[in-house]
Image (tube, grey):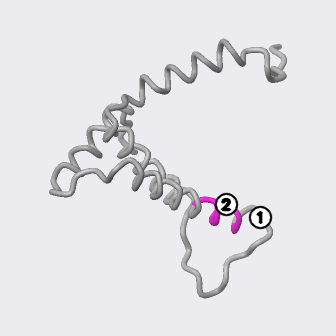
Amino acid sequence: MAVQKSIKELQAEVDTYISQFKEGYFSPLAMLARLTEELGELAREINHYYGEKPKKSSETEKAIEEELGDLLFVLICMANALNIDLEEAHDYVMNKFNTRDKDRWTRIEQE
């Protein structure tokens, strides 16, 4: 059974990992490039699983979970480097969706 971690714990875990290296966090622009790279890798895997482009026999098997994990790691690095608390960022976005967009989508009927 996996241990549940809060977003704060994830951010602290990534910071502990990155802090052991002299190079530290990459610049925001370099992290944006990495984020874009990881998103492309996720898109490629999604396309292989759900799209019309099957993998070549020479391509290694990667899981969507792995690509999402890579994307999450870089996103956490970017947040940490910019001193952004992702729990606060999440709360802000959810408040926006629950107020500004509260009537935007068709709700499922409650029985």
Residue bounds of the magenta highlight: 42-48
Instruction: Inspect the image, locate mark 1, and give the three-letter code of the amino acid beneath it.
Output: Gly
Residue in the image at 31% along x and 32% along y = 83
Residue under circle 2? 46
Q: Which residue is the extreme one toward the bottom?
A: 58
Q: Is residue 46 magenta?
A: yes
Residue in the image at 38% along x and 38% along y = 79
Instruction: Inspect the image, locate mark 2, and give the three-letter code of the amino acid beneath it.
Output: Ile
Q: Is residue 65 magenta?
A: no
Question: Is residue 66 depicted above or below 13 in this figure?
Answer: below
Residue in the image at 56% along x and 64% along y = 41
Quarter where residue 78 is shown: top left
Quarter where residue 49 is shown: bottom right
Residue under circle 1? 51
* Residue 95 place in picture, x, y as percent: 57, 16
* Residue 80 place in picture, x, y as percent: 32, 39
* Residue 13 place in picture, x, y as percent: 27, 43
Disc 1 vs disc 2: Cβ atoms closer than 8 Å?
yes
Quarter of the picture holding the N terminus: top left
- Secondary structure mostly seen in magenta is helix
Of the image marks 1 and 2, the number of the one nearer the N terminus = 2
Spatial separation of the CA atoms under disc 1 and disc 2: 7 Å
